[in-house]
Amino acid sequence: MYKGMLVSFTEINKENEDELKSWFVNEHIDERAINTEGFFRSRLYECLDNGPKFFATYETTSFDILSSNNYMSKVSNQTKWSKEIIPKLTMLDRLTGKVTIDKMRGYGGNIIVFRFLPLEMRENRDNLRKIFRTEFDQIIKLKFINGLCLIENDSKVSTSTGKKAENIGGNPNLNIKDEWLVIIEGQDDLKLKNSFDRIFNKKIIEDNLGKKISTNSYRLIYGNNR
């Protein structure tokens, strides 16, 4: 049984950024990590380069939690503050994924997030997972690397939960594909970039990628867990 991870990329007009961060830090991260059944850890990050401004992760004990009746009820009955914030977002990309390779632990100050579409053939996807498992085992041994994982989005689930945001006036991106994400977490942005290059400069990986979407660096703002 795979763990699940809901991730969101969000942006808002500059004048509302402090309010958005306050909502994440003073309500939303804790509400999900502590007060939502099946969730056990949530984190918020701010971009260090030109990617989407904010990135949040919400980890669950199993992928099925992200389509459960309890979670769907939570999404359909947002808090008063959420109903004020979500319609103001100028960007909302939500992915609901299976954590198919999990080497995450603790908290690091920085992460790299790589979004891409794998090739559709099962053989290519199996090859990618095999390569990642080998490389992840080596990267996790490096100094200043806290953890890393592979997340495989399920577009049907992300679309169904995203539609709930539409119901309260939000504008989520409902065209998210079955993309994959690699998250590498550590304490030093340069060392993270070096570890990233170690994986993605390999031709065998390039041969199994369909389309690169983005690669961005983020720093931790706040996190909580049960």
Image (cartoon, rainbow, N blue to C red):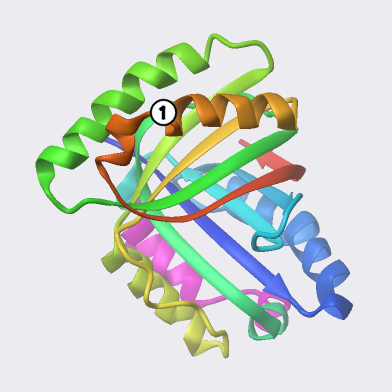
On the picture, is 114 further left or further right than 222?
left
Q: Is residue 210 left or right of residue 66?
A: left
Instruction: Based on the picture, tell me whether residue 181 belongs to the magenta stretch.
Output: no
Q: In the rendered image, is residue 123 in sight? A: yes
* Callout 1: SS: strand
| Magenta stretch contains residue 67 | yes
Q: Position of residue 205 (x, y in %)?
A: 32, 34
Boundaries of the magenta span: 65-83
Q: Residue at x 37, y 66 (%)?
A: 158
Is residue 140 or residue 8 the one in the foreground?
A: 140
Q: Main secondary structure of the magenta part?
A: helix
Q: Position of residue 111 (x, y in %)?
A: 64, 37
Q: Nearer the viewer, residue 76 or 100?
A: 100
* Residue on which the image places disc 1: 102
Amino acid bearing label 1:
Asp
Front residue of 52/15: it is 52
